[in-house]
Image (cartoon, rainbow, N blue to C red):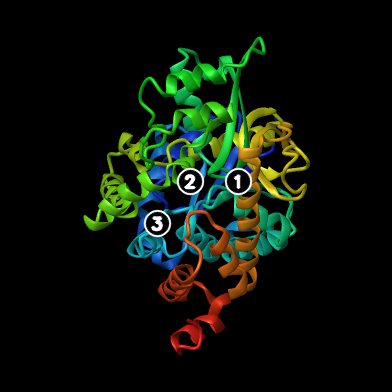
Amino acid sequence: MKNNKIKIVTIGGGSSYTPELIEGFIKRKDELPIKEIWLVDIEDGKEKLEIVGNLARRMVKEAGLDWEVHLTLDRRAALKDADFVSTQLRVGLLDARIKDERIPLSHGMLGQETNGAGGMFKAFRTIPVILGIVEDMKELCPNAWLVNFTNPAGMVTEAVLKYGNYNKVVGLCNVPIMHTIKESEMLGKNPEELFFHYAGLNHYHWHRVYDKEGNELTLDIINEMFNGDNKVVENISGIKFMEEQIRDLEMLPCAYHRYYYMHDDMLHEELEEFKNNNTRAEKVKRVEAELFELYKDPNLKVKPEQLNQRGGAHYSDAACEIISSIHNDKRSIMVVDTRNNGAVTDLPYDSAVEISSYITGSGPKPITFGKFNAAARGQIQLMKAMEELTIEAAVTGDYGKALQAFTINPMVPAGTVAREVLNELLIAHKDYLPQFKDSIEKIEEGKLK
């Protein structure tokens, strides 16, 4: 283990997830020689930063550690000489997520944070901000690793690699972790007894499972899937997949595949929630308000159990493990977003994939997955093309590219309605989309409709 003291910066430090991040660092206090933790936020997040930052300080003190916990709105001051930078920001805050969900649903299409129309708009808002952070990092901490768990994590990672020209980046999602925990329980085993081989895209991956002797257990889990509870992730319905389809795939789907494989059922559920002003974003806003009331308690010195209701459990702990594995060259096997480098034969070599990887001192080394069968290959290549178009539109503000991305996204009906929803979301989020300024003006003037 390296003994040199390290500086860690978290941008979006006022997030409700920060206590889990601090807990993860405390758990690894013997692996990570931390000197400073900087929590950074924006003016609109100042109050939350103060609340969660003070909790972080209490947690560190309770653990008997001498780490310095700094709170700041000055990103550049925080980034100076950082060793690791994590990003957990939400451009436009939860009100933007509510628009991402409700506007598509008002047109009868699925509204979701990282998939479909809402997911593309989250990318449009987020990617330019992350690329701005990367430019600061190149100047102020050029050797730092960027650990991103801002959604859509895969597209953000690819944008940093291709448009930010920054290779020391790794993306992270908690969904594979949730699958690993749930499916290990199905088999009556500990996760350490099994090897989970994931491959695909963020929120659009499949996996196979093996025991330590190399025996494949994927079919055993498929059998269990259709004999009991199907819910894996807190924020996604447990609607059962079609058994014949999953058996034909001979792989285990991601929980988010329900939005594609079980589209009509998921849409029906979401429309009911929409009518009752109870979309996932609206639920999360209520849960988050309750969490921050808890965080205010000066006697609270540990992560509250209620944080697990937020839907993103294990994100932050996994980020801490990535940092530890890079710092100590631990070579932990984790599922991350990283450059493909040929690990998934059916996707471009330089694209970002979500895949089981060894996390080394020089970053993630993806474990070769090979080819997909025809059903998965056809879907994932379409989704990758959609991601590429979305990223380009986010960087350039090209309306045509955005419309193309909408047109080929399976969750967006092509044609006039795609343009209507695109235009409505552009207007709704115009304060956070300066790259689309010219197109937004044309829409408002009635010249683009």
Mark 2 to mark 1 CA distance (whole Å)? 10 Å
Q: Earlier in the sequence, mark 3 or mark 1?
A: 3
Mark 2 to mark 3 CA distance (whole Å)? 13 Å
**Which residue is more in the foreground, 384 or 163?**
384
Q: Are marks 2 and 1 in contact (CB under 8 Å)?
A: yes
Picture layout, residue 105 above or below residue 400: above
State the image coordinates of residue 377 (x, y, percent, origin top left). Answer: 66, 41
Indicate the secondary structure of the residue bearing disc 1. Answer: helix
Q: Mark 2 points at which residue?
A: 260
How many labels, in total? 3
Q: Mark 1 points at which residue?
A: 379
State the image coordinates of residue 176 (x, y, percent, origin top left). Answer: 53, 34
> Is 65 on the left-hand or right-hand side of 331?
left
Q: Name the residue under label 3.
A: 111
Indicate the secondary structure of the residue bearing disc 2. Answer: helix
Q: Residue furthest left?
A: 276
Q: What residue type is labelled 1?
A: Gln
Mark 3 to mark 1 CA distance (whole Å)? 20 Å
Q: Residue 27 carries which label?
A: none
